[in-house]
């Protein structure tokens, strides 16, 4: 038998949550191993069950979907994330992609599209609802605009670029060091080199720059 994708579904609306679960259960390549009505319970299930995939509503009590995704990302848990949302704003979209979310779909989609998303993510691909695909274009435009306005970004090494993205998540040097398994001193050296290359001077100015340009880094 082919690999069965183990899934946790989290949504604070019981009828909607059960509807998704029933739709998934009709397909033998998927297995629902947990269901949650709030973000804290979703994170507990993800940590305990280590599912292949977690489907998370953005708006949930205790922890929203992005907060759960952030915890999964921070702790390097082996679970891919699909976000369910009513929001079509670039801010939410960018936050999700910055956290490594693989699927970003609207809650009013058809079940067939939901299943297509699950299959795509299971195959290692990204899936975004077609009706909000334009957000990808906007994201790319912002990245190109930043590259034009701050050409020195091209001088950053891959390691420095990775550090800059983590700074943009408002992580401290210690938190970054624990995440990427290097010393705090190494992180601080990278931060110093980034500031030198970008011409950034002053206390917390690197953090300020990273937060302002988070969606384009």
Image: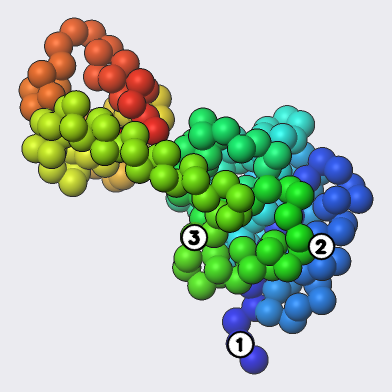
Label 3 – label 1 distance at C-alpha = 21 Å
Q: Alpha carbon of mark 2 to alpha carbon of mark 3: how far?
A: 21 Å
Q: Mark 3 points at which residue?
A: 126
Say which quarter of the image contains residue 156. Answer: top left
Give the total number of marks visible in the rendering: 3
**Disc number lying in front (2 or 3):** 3
Question: Which SS class for mark 2?
Answer: helix
Q: Earlier in the sequence, mark 2 or mark 3?
A: 2
Q: Which of marks 2 and 1 is nearer the N terminus?
A: 1
Q: Considering depth in this image, is 19 or 45 the residue closer to the camera?
A: 19
Task: Name the residue carrying label 2.
Answer: 21
Q: Specify which label sits upstream in the sequence, 3 or 1.
A: 1
User: Is label 1 in a helix, a strand or a loop?
Assistant: loop
- The image shows residue 91, relative to residue 116, as above or below, that is above
Tell me the tag on residue 2.
1
- Outermost residue to the right: 15
The residue positioned 34% from the left and 34% from the top of the image is 142
Instruction: Find out whether the residues at labels 3 and 1 contact each other: C-beta distance under 8 Å.
Output: no
| Quarter occupied by the N terminus | bottom right
């Amino acid at each position: 038998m082919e690999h069965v994708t183990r899934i946790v579904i989290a949504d604070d609306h019981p009828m909607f949550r059960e509807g998704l679960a029933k739709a998934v259960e009709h397909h033998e390549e998927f297995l629902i191993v947990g269901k949650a009505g709030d973000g804290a319970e979703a994170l507990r299930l993800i940590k305990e069950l280590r599912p292949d995939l977690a489907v998370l509503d953005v708006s949930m009590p205790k922890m929203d979907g992005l907060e759960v995704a952030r915890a999964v990302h921070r702790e390097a848990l082996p679970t891919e994330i699909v976000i369910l949302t009513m929001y079509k704003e670039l801010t939410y979209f960018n936050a999700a992609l910055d956290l490594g979310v693989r699927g970003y779909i609207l809650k009013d989609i058809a079940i067939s599209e939901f299943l297509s998303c699950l299959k795509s993510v299971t195959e290692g691909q990204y899936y975004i609802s077609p009706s909000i695909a334009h957000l990808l274009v906007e994201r790319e435009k912002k990245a190109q605009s930043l590259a034009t306005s701050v050409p020195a970004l091209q001088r950053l090494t891959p390691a420095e670029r990775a550090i800059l993205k983590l700074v943009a998540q408002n992580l401290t040097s210690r938190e970054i060091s624990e995440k990427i398994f290097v010393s705090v001193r190494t992180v601080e050296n990278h931060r110093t080199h980034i500031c030198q290359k970008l011409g950034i001077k002053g206390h917390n100015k690197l953090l300020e720059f990273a937060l302002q340009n988070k969606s384009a880094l």
